Amino acid sequence: MSKTIYHANAVLTTLKNSSPYVSFLTAEPVSDTDYDEVAATNYVRVQPTFGTPADGLMANTAAINFAGNLFNQPIRYIGIFDAATTGHLLRYYAVSGGEWIVNTTDPVSIGIGGLIIGEK
């Protein structure tokens, strides 16, 4: 079954307007409530700013900055959640390169346009 671009953009607009949160996951999630999120001092989910969906795609229009002194754990997926804590995982994406290793003193930033969500 296919969807139209209009429908894809409408779904992304609904996601954007729901004020989602971005997180880092260490393994592929099992379900919307069974996932391995990074656990570190100063780590919190971040609310991104997304642009207007077009052609079934939506990208962040401002950097997504996570606090420093974070992980020293592998980051394998980026999760999109409906709440700042707990809540439900709405969707997730594998990170480029398969895994990011972050030193405990390095801040992490996803640059403008670095997170593209598709609904095609």
Image (spheres, grey):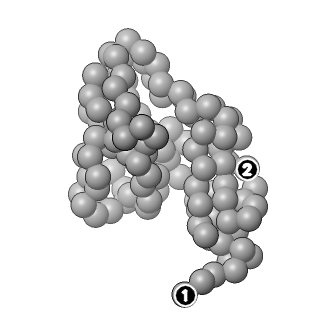
- Can you say whether 88 is above or below 46 in the image? below
Q: What SS does tag 2 mark? A: loop
Q: Within 10 Å of the Cα at label 1, are there few (<14), some (14-19), or many (20+) other Cα atoms?
A: few
Residue 55 falls left or right of residue 17: right
Q: Position of residue 111 (x, y in %)?
A: 62, 31
Q: Position of residue 43 (x, y in %)?
A: 37, 29
Query: Where's the C terminus, which quadrant?
Result: bottom right
| Residue at the farthest bottom position | 1
Give the x, y percent position of residue 114.
Answer: 60, 39
Residue furthest toward the front? Answer: 97
Q: Tell me the quarter of the picture where residue 75 sits.
A: top left
Mark 1, residue position? 1
Amino acid marked by disc 2? Gly
Q: Residue at x 34, y 26 (%)?
A: 101
* Between discs 1 and 2, the one toward the N terminus: 1
Residue 6 location, quadrant: bottom right
Q: Secondary structure at mark 1?
A: loop
- Residue 82 lies left or right of residue 71; in this view the side is right
Residue 47 seen from this side: yes
Instruction: In this rendered view, identify the residue nearer to me: 90 or 112.
Output: 112
On residue 35, which mark appears? none
Residue type at mark 1: give it: Met
> Considering the image in quadrants, where does the N terminus appear?
bottom right
Picture coordinates of residue 104, whole percent (x, y): 33, 16
Residue at 32%, 62% (x, y): give it: 32
